Amino acid sequence: MTIITITTVLILGLVYLFYKQIRKFNKYIYGLCVIIGIISFTQETTIINMGYVGLSFFLVVMFTGVIDKSEMKKRLAGTRAELAIIGTIFVAVHGLKFIVFAIDYGFLWTAPFYFYLGVASVFIVIPLFITSFLIIRKKMKGKTWKNLHKLSYLFYLLVGLHLVFMNNDRIFFYIGIFAVYLITRIWTYFEKKLAKKPQPKPIQQKTTQSA
Amino acid sequence: MKNIILIVLLVLMLGSSFAFEPVTDSIDIIAGSTNTTYSTTIDLIAGVSEQGNSDSFYGN
C-alpha cells in the first residue's frame, strides 16, 4: 500500500512538472523502461516484479479519465498514452515473471484463480498497448480506436478482481480504490450526459409596434 | 469538487499506509526482501520462506 501510494504520488508529481519532456522524449523513456524491466526480470523480488509500479501507473491513467478539468488533468491527459505504455511495460514484466515462475515450479495449470485473472489482463492490454503508439493510432479511424479502447474498462476490472481475489492484507485498500474509481466514473458519465443535454431556448416575447 | 475529494482520499490513503505498514518493511521490499507485510504467495509455493522463517534446505 505504501509502495503503491508513494509511487502514484511520485508519478503525479513528475507528470505535473515534466509533462512536456515526457511527450518530447517518450521513445527514450520507453527504451529506459524496457531496460529497467529486463533488469528487474532477472531479479527475484522487486517492486516492478511484484506489480506495484505497473499498478501505480495504471491508477494514474484510470483516474485521469475521471478528474475534473484542471491544469493537472490537462497535463495528465496530455501524457496519458505515455503513462499507459510505461505501465504496460512494467505490468508485462510482472506478468511474465509470474508465468515463468509458474512454469518453472509446475503450477501453471493449478494456480490460484487470481493468477489466471492476471494472465487474462496481460493479454487484454496487448492491443491497447500497441494502439497507444501514435504511429499506429494515426492509421486507425477515430471511432475504431475509441471502441477498441473501451476494452480498458475490462482490463481495469480484471486487474481489480486479480488484486481482490489475492485476499491479502491490502484487500480493503484495493476494494476501496476500485470502488472510488467506479463511483467517480459513473459520476463523470452523468456529468457529461447532463452537459450535452440541449438547453431550452429562452422564449422571446413579441412586441407589438404602434403605427 | 471531485478533484478535492480525490486529493483528500489520496492523502488519507498515504496516511493510513504509513500507519498500518511499517516503513522498514517498505524499504526492505524495495531492496528486494519479502517480509510479513509484503509476503508473496510465490515465496510459499517455492518453499523459500514461511511466516518469516527460512525453510530448511533441500525441501525438508
Image (tube, rainbow, N blue to C red):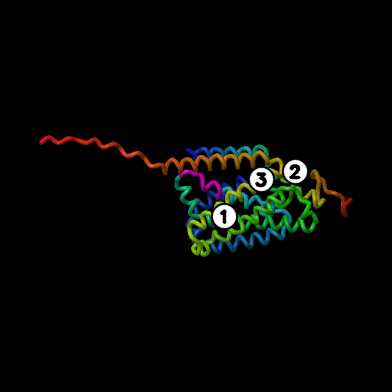
Task: Give the label, 3 or 1, closer to the camera.
Answer: 3
Extreme residue in the right direction: B60
Chain containing mark 3: A
Q: Secondary structure at mark 1?
A: helix
Marks 3 and 2, Cα distance to the nearest angstrom? 23 Å
User: Does A62 lie within the magenta span?
Assistant: yes
Which residue is label 3 attached to?
A161
Q: Are marks 2 and 1 on the same chain?
A: no
Residue A41 placement (x, y as % from top left): 70, 59
Chain containing mark 1: A
Task: Give the label, 3 or 2, closer to the camera.
Answer: 3
Q: Is residue A202 above or below residue A32?
A: above
**In the image, what residue occupies the spot 17% across and 35% down?**
A208
Crowding at dot 2, Cα within 10 Å, few <14 / some 14-19 / many 20+, comes out as few
Report if residue B17 is visible in the image: no
Crowding at dot 1, Cα within 10 Å, few <14 / some 14-19 / many 20+, comes out as many
Q: Which residues are magenta?
A: A61-68
Q: Say whether disc 3 or disc 1 marks the residue closer to the N-terminus.
A: 1
Which residue is label 1 attached to?
A84
Which residue is label 2 attached to?
B36
**In the image, what residue occupies the spot 71% across and 48% down?**
A114
Residue type indicated by callout 1: Ala
Residue B13 placement (x, y as % from top left): 60, 39
Q: Nearer the viewer, residue A42 or A211?
A: A211
Residue type indicated by callout 3: Leu
Marks 2 and 1, Cα distance to the nearest angstrom? 31 Å
